Amino acid sequence: MEQSIESFGSEDNERIGKLREWAAGHFEDVTGYAPVSGKLRLIQTVLDNKWVSADDTLKLQSLGIAFGDALEQDVSELSWVMVDDEFGRDPALQWLATNHLVFPLTAIAKRIEDGMEVDVEHLFSGFKKAIRQSVASDA
């Protein structure tokens, strides 16, 4: 199957919205979720307190969406899209209108499932560096 990239449809918005709601719902005042630092702090707090386990797929995906939201917010060239390919239909961040894609949905989950400790700030910095290096290598 060839990869197709498109904007979120209404079902996609509903699915991603539910994942965001779980993450943002940890704040009494939702404005705590608004800044990049709020999202990253939330993810780290959830992981440090072991409020999710390796088999909590939807909660781990919620953290992945929060991670992606922080990336999109911090790197203005990134925007959310849906990608259909041989692996299914998943949200991704796209660098402008290029083929450069980042799949944050499972960025946290894969590490937790592998039993890794996650330093969210370090992971965030690493993702940003890798994205910029990938784009620069094509320039």
Image (tube, rainbow, N blue to C red):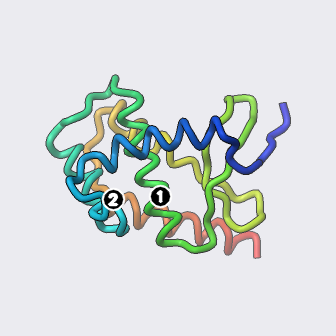
Instruction: Please tell me which residue is depicted at 53% across the width and 64% down the height of the picture.
Output: 72
Q: Which residue is mark 2?
A: 39
Crowding at mark 1 (Cα within 10 Å: few <14, some 14-19, many 20+): many
Q: Which residue is mark 1?
A: 69
Q: Residue furthest top?
A: 55
Toward the viewer: 82 or 110?
82
Q: Residue furthest left?
A: 49
Query: Considering the numbered disc 1 on the image, is that residue within a helix, a strand or a loop?
Result: helix
Instruction: Please tell me which residue is depicted at 74% across the width and 29% down the height of the picture.
Output: 86
Quarter of the image where one finds residue 91: top right
Left or right of 62? Residue 117 is left
Quarter of the image where one finds residue 112: top left
Quadrant assignment for the C terminus: bottom right
Give the answer, above or below, for where 17 lies relative to 136: above
Quarter of the image where one finds residue 121: bottom left
The residue type indicated by label 2 comes to Lys
Left or right of 109? Residue 43 is left
Crowding at mark 2 (Cα within 10 Å: few <14, some 14-19, many 20+): many
